[in-house]
Image: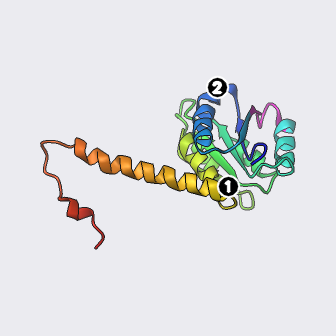
């Protein structure tokens, strides 16, 4: 892949921590990305132009991180046909619940994929799965990441001590 295929747009620099978590996953999977700040309320023209130019610049998916009213994912989705994944930031007096509802309650015709509050890793993995539809190398890396997560859970069973545990046969295919 040449050039970024995933765009990460932060509604504010205060969302950078979630942007970094997203970046870490994309880097681990070998997915080229770019990251910027654009506000649906304070720089709306930048949001519109970014969305309208994204596909022509080679992006395949946009991850939008925003808190409070979280208008950014919907504003981006309104101006592109690319998939937009909204990451509600845990901010404000409602701890991100307002952002989650804003991202999840889009009007008909403006789809936005919503992940949980602060779920930057899931947003990156969702973006990777979209990109994997067209890139076999990324598909393999996503599959390996899922296998590693599975192994971590299986290995964690060994940490349960002094409590009744099921036999290993309990997890065999029936």
Q: CA distance from mark 2 to mark 1?
A: 27 Å
Note whether 154 is above or below 98 in the view shown: below
What predominant SS class does the magenta segment belong to? loop
Colour theme? rainbow
Depth check: 59 or 38 in front?
59
- Is 127 placed left or right of 50 in the picture? left
Q: Which residue is mark 1?
A: 131
Residue 112 position in % (x across, y down): 67, 53
Label drawn at residue 162? none
Residue name at image x 64 percent, y 46 percent: 86
Note whether 54 is above or below 93 in the view shown: below
Label drawn at residue 14? 2
Residue 105 position in % (x across, y down): 63, 53
Instruction: Please provide the residue range marked out in magenta.
Output: 36-44
Note whether 94 is above or below 116 in the view shown: above
Query: What kind of element bears circle 1?
Result: helix
Circle 2 or circle 1, nearest the eye:
1
Residue name at image x 74 percent, y 57 percent: 110
Residue 41 position in % (x across, y down): 78, 34
Looking at the image, how many numbered discs can be counted on the residues? Answer: 2
Per the image, is 105 magenta?
no
Depth check: 151 or 75 in front?
151
Residue name at image x 71 percent, y 40 percent: 33
Residue name at image x 55 percent, y 37 percent: 96
User: Which residue, as the protein is rendered here, is positioned at the far bottom?
Assistant: 174
Query: What kind of element bears circle 2?
Result: helix
For the C terminus, give its image quadrant: bottom left
Per the image, is 37 magenta?
yes
Q: Earlier in the sequence, mark 2 or mark 1?
A: 2
């Amino acid at each position: 892949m040449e050039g970024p295929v995933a765009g990460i747009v932060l509604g504010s620099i205060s969302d950078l921590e979630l942007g970094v978590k997203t970046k870490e996953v994309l880097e681990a999977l070998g997915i080229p990305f770019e990251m910027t700040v654009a506000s649906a309320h304070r720089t709306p023209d930048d949001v519109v132009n970014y969305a309208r130019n994204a596909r022509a610049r080679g992006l395949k998916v946009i991850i939008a991180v925003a808190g409070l009213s979280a208008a950014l994912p919907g504003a981006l989705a309104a101006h592109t046909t690319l998939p937009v994944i909204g990451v509600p930031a845990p901010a404000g007096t409602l701890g991100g619940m307002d952002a989650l509802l804003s991202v999840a309650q889009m009007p008909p015709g403006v789809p936005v994929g919503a992940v949980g509050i602060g779920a930057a890793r899931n947003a990156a993995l969702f973006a990777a799965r979209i990109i994997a539809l067209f890139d076999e190398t990324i598909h393999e890396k996503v599959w390996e990441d899922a296998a590693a997560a599975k192994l971590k859970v299986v290995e964690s069973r060994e940490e349960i001590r002094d409590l009744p545990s099921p036999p290993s046969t309990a997890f065999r295919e029936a």
